[in-house]
Image (cartoon, rainbow, N blue to C red):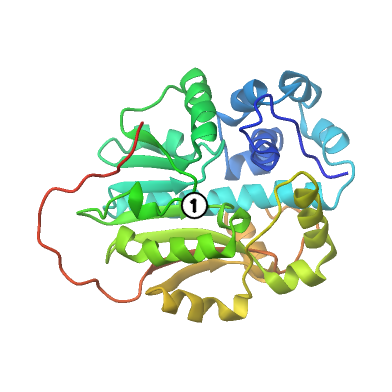
Amino acid sequence: MHFLPDPIDPAVSRTALMVCAYCALTARHPAFAKAFRDPFAEPLYRLAAREGDALMERTPDWPAVERVVLAEGGVAATALTSVVWRKRWIEDHARRALEDGIRRVVVLGGGLDTLALRLAPAFPAASFIEVDRTETQRVKRRLAAQVAGIPDNLAFVEADLAITPLEAVLSESSGPTLLIAEFVLEYLPPEAVARLFGSFRPLIGAQGRLIFTFMSKPSLETEPLARRYAEAAEAIGEPIRWRLDPALLSGFLRDHGLRARDRLNTRVLIDSYLDRIGINVPGVVPERPVDTLHMVLASANHPSPSRSAGPSLSHKGRR
C-alpha cells in the first residue's frame, strides 16, 4: 500500500507529512542528498508524525528505506523520486529569482515545506510569506520555532485558499513578487483555482514570477501509477480536485495574462534534468508516469499599467 503516515495533529495533511518524510529520507541516498538536502525535514517529521522517531530510526541508510518504505515499489518509489527533482527545481528557480532582485516570496499552502525557512536567513533583504489555513499555520509556527526558529523576515498568514480571495490577505507589491503554489492547487476546487489565477497577475507584478504545479488530466485517466496515487489521496479524504490538460496550458496562462518561461515534465525532460543535477543513477531512479506531474515557471505576458508610487504593505493578516 502507498506510504501515508499518520499526523499527530489532524491539522497536518497526510500527504504533506508523506512529502516531509520523503524529504528526510532522500538524505539516506548519496546521489539524492547531493541534489537536494533539507536539514529541517527529519526533525519536523519526528515531531509531526505518530511514531515519527520510530520510522527515522528504522531507516538509517538507503537499503533500510527501500525495505521499510519503498518495498511496494510503484507509487512510493515514484513519489519519493519526484520529491527530489521537484524540490530542487523549485529551489533553483526561487534562488535565481531572489538573485535577480525579487524581494517578496509568497508560498501558498506550504504545509510542512521548509523552502521559506531555508531561504529567509540567506536572503535577509527579502520578505517571505506563507499562506495557509489557520489550523495548519498554528502547527507550522510551533514546529518551525522548535526545529529552526522563525526568521524575522518570514510571516505566516492565515487564509483558507479554497474560500478566501488571495488579494484579501496580500497586497500588490511595489516590487516584483515570486508566488509558489507547489502541489496545492491540485487539492482545491476548480472555481477556487480560477479565482486564484485571476489574482496572480496583479500580485506578482510585471517583473514577478509564478511557480506552480498541476497534474495532467489525461495522465490521471490513463497512467496506472497516477490513478493509484489519486485513489490513495481520495481514500484519506484529500482528493485531487483540479487537473489540467497540458495541451491547454498555453491558452490557460494567456487567458490570465501569463506565459510559461520554463517547464519540467515528460520523461525526456525529467531524465535530462536529473542528469544535469547528477542523480540519473542507473537502477535508482524508478519507472514513473511519463506525463503526470507538471512544473511551470510563469511570468506576466505583458507589462502591467503603471501605478502611482506609494507605500505598499507586503502582506495583510496576522503573523
Q: Position of residue 197 (x, y in %)?
A: 44, 65
Quarter-of-image position of residue 52: top right
Which of 155 and 272 lies nearest the eye of the viewer? 155
Amino acid under disc 1 = Ile
Quarter-of-image position of residue 100: bottom left
Q: Mark 1 points at which residue?
A: 163
* Kind of element beneath mark 1: loop
Q: Can residue 278 be seen in this view?
A: no
Tell which residue pokes out farthest to the front in this image.
163
Q: Where is residue 166 in the image (x, y as percent from the top left)?
A: 39, 53
Q: Where is residue 95 in the image (x, y as percent from the top left)?
A: 40, 49
Tell which residue pokes out farthest to the left in this image.
309
Say which residue appears at 71% left-offset and 33% top-offset: 28
Is residue 256 rendered to the left or right of residue 22? left
Which of 208 and 67 lies nearest the eye of the viewer? 208
Quarter-of-image position of residue 217: bottom right
Q: Position of residue 226 (x, y in %)?
A: 77, 61
Say which residue appears at 30% left-offset and 43% top-offset: 315
Q: In this view, does 269 lie above or below 150?
A: below
Say which residue appears at 37% left-offset and 62% top-offset: 199
Q: Is residue 319 above or below residue 186?
A: above
